[in-house]
Image (cartoon, rainbow, N blue to C red):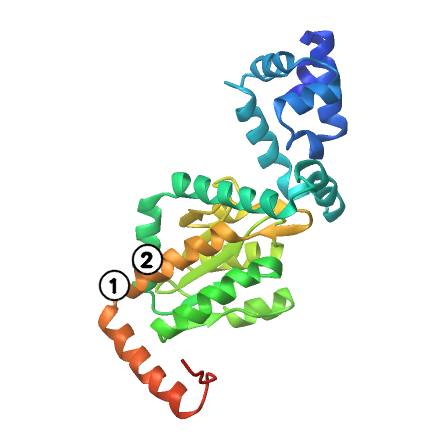
Amino acid sequence: MQIQENMSSFSKGQKRIASFIMSSYDKAAFMTASKLGQTANVSESTVVRFAAELGYDGYPSMQKSLQKMIRNRLTSVQRIEMANDQIDNQDIVASVLRSDISMLRSTIEELDRGMFDRAVTAILEGRRIYIMGVRSASAISHFLAFYLNLICDNVCEISASTTSEVFEQILRIGPEDVFIGACFPRYSSRTIKAMQYAHDQGAKVIAITDSELSPAAAKADITLVARSDMASFVDSLVAPLSVVNALLVAVSQKCNENVSDTFSRLEHIWDEYDVYEKTER
């Protein structure tokens, strides 16, 4: 976004918009055109013209570009401040759930079905499936590994607190293997480094991430885009978990007979060893 370079050509109102964006980019990126105009003391139409001056086909395009540029730079404090501007404190439940619904809709529209099919095929053909996600993304990797392990017998979930431990667990990864990395803002350097190593060793790398422009996508052969957003300092993982759910269903359907046999055995074991509490109906 070439704001500084174009400053001399801006009108007075556009300069006020530019100054606010440069000083408070973390807030500006998530404001509506109307809200940004009010904050910069200009009209909404001036904000729209400002976006066009920068070469965008509309304010939403400029906003999307700014969000992608800064999302990984937001600190937890900035996230909280941004959420306070976005969320209706009178009905937090509705605000957060509407945001999640919006992320799901965007994911449905943007997820490349060809990439999705390639990911399913890679998992089915992989000699060994390595799965990794750290910090909040560990919820995604753990969910995927838990259920995929019930379908396949070649799953390895990477669980390590240091970079050296990660590499020790993927030391023998090779061209016949698959590495699945779940990585969302703020992107974990540990996951990115592991994906790079897996790629260098010839493994098929699948990224589950929020954008084609994310650092995880740059290391992947296959990218599954699942939109995420932030409610305060909390990462929204509704859409990523839905994509993982779809991935699990697609894989299980491809090996339906084996899955049925596996769960028949598991049901017997669960019953015999009282794994689940029996309830009266």
Q: Position of residue 205 (x, y in %)?
A: 42, 56
Q: In the drawing, what numbered circle is on residue 120?
A: 2
Q: Position of residue 180 (x, y in %)?
A: 45, 59
Q: Is residue 246 visible?
A: yes
Q: Which quadrant holds residue 112?
A: top left
Q: Position of residue 175 (x, y in %)?
A: 37, 62
Q: Position of residue 4 (x, y in %)?
A: 70, 19
- Mark 1, residues whose alpha carbon is within 10 Å: few (<14), some, or many (≥20)? few
Position of residue 209 relative to residue 247, above or below, is above
**Given contact means CB atoms under 8 Å apart, are the residues at marks 2 and 1 in contact?**
yes
Left or right of 151, for residue 71? right
Q: Earlier in the sequence, mark 2 or mark 1?
A: 2
User: SS of the residue at dot 2?
Assistant: helix
Quadrant of the frame with the C terminus: bottom left
Closer mark to the observer between disc 2 and disc 1: 1
Position of residue 245 relative to residue 217, above or below, is below
The residue positioned 32% from the left and 57% from the top of the image is: 120
Q: CA distance from mark 2 to mark 1?
A: 9 Å
Position of residue 50 relative to residue 266, above or below, is above
Furthest toward the bottom, the residue is 272
User: SS of the residue at dot 1?
Assistant: helix
The residue positioned 45% from the left and 89% from the top of the image is: 274
Circle 1 sits on which residue?
Answer: 254
**Residue 19 vs residue 259, the one in the foreground:** 259
**Residue 125 vs residue 201, the one in the foreground:** 125
